[in-house]
Image (cartoon, grey):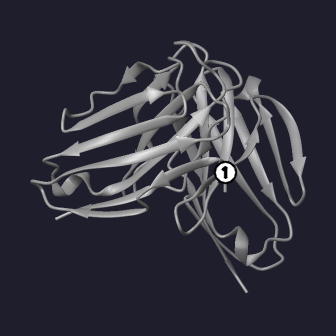
């Protein structure tokens, strides 16, 4: 248990479904992240929230919609996904906040949500 | 942006063997971390090491920032060490987010 909890751990959805991934951190961190990990590819940063404000959106399609209602919770809302969106979605948090987040931003990851889109 | 190269891409060891994993990066860094991803997908932070040397049990890491590389040493490997080892860096000038390498897939056989 890392202090970052992701649910569900596994999700199968059709292309017309709407679902959400949830992430909760109990570490008192100020920044939260969504990463995508596809087979045979490095982790790709999708979104960064710092102090509940989105500070980065790496050209992610609009069918992925993040929400950060407070500094402990992060959601990823999924809508009309494609089969190529099947991947492991990882949430992480770090102590650092602010747009710079340089220096000692040590990431703590959740266990991931494995998504399959049929 | 900053480039991160890890080697070797795959490594197979017998239990008890030692190994060295390498991470090369293309720019000066503020932040360098090593992670281990187990077969179930969980990523665990092993070291935060933008420079210098650290040790934690059978694992140690060294970053030579001036020469833009980091090494992760695993001694007396165990089957539970199997998984993928990632290096991630945050460049001083290339933006302020971690860029991950492609990882080294380690398999330790009994």
Mark 1 — residue? Answer: A2
Secondary structure of residue under mark 1? loop
Q: Quadrant of residue A29?
A: top right
Q: Quadrant of residue A94?
A: top right
**Foreground: A21 or B29?**
A21
From the viewer's perspective, is A74 left or right of B89?
A: left
From the viewer's perspective, is A82 left or right of A51?
A: left
Q: Residue at x 75, y 45 (%)?
A: B71
Most extreme residue toward the bottom is: B110
Label 1 CA crowd tier, 10 Å (few <14, some 14–19, many 20+): some
From the viewer's perspective, is B19 left or right of A39?
A: right
Q: Residue at x 24, y 45 (%)?
A: A78
Q: Is residue A35 above or below residue B37?
A: above
Image quadrant holding the C terminus of chain A, namely bottom left
Most extreme residue toward the left is: A16
Residue B47 place in picture, x, y as percent: 76, 43
**Foreground: B69 or A60?**
A60
Residue A45 place in picture, x, y as percent: 42, 35
Residue B25 place in picture, x, y as percent: 60, 32
Q: Is residue B46 above or below residue B25?
A: below
From the viewer's perspective, is A95 left or right of A93?
A: right
Q: Residue at x 40, y 20 (%)?
A: A54
Residue A20 place in picture, x, y as percent: 30, 47
Which chain is home to disc 1? A
Image quadrant holding the N terminus of chain A, namely bottom right
């Amino acid at each position: 248990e890392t202090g970052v909890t992701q649910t569900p751990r596994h999700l199968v959805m059709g292309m017309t479904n709407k679902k959400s991934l949830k992430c909760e951190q109990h570490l008192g961190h100020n920044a939260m992240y969504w990463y995508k990990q596809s087979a045979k590819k490095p982790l790709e940063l999708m979104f960064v929230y710092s102090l509940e404000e989105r500070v980065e959106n790496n050209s992610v399609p609009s069918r992925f919609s993040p929400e950060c209602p407070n500094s402990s919770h992060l959601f990823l809302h999924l809508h009309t996904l494609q089969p190529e969106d099947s991947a492991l979605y990882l949430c992480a948090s770090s102590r650092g906040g602010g747009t710079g987040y340089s220096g000692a931003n040590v990431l703590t990851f959740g266990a991931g949500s494995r998504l399959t889109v049929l | 942006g900053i480039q991160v190269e890890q080697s070797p891409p795959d490594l197979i060891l017998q239990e008890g063997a030692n190994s060295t994993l390498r991470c090369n990066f293309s720019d000066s860094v503020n932040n360098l971390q090593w992670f281990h991803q187990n077969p179930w997908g969980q990523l665990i932070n092993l070291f935060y090491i933008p420079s210098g040397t650290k040790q934690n049990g059978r694992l140690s890491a060294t970053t030579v920032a001036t020469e833009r590389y980091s090494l992760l040493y695993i001694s007396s490997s165990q089957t539970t060490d199997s998984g993928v080892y990632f290096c991630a860096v945050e460049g001083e000038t290339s933006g302020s987010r971690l860029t991950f390498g492609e990882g080294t897939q380690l398999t330790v056989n009994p």
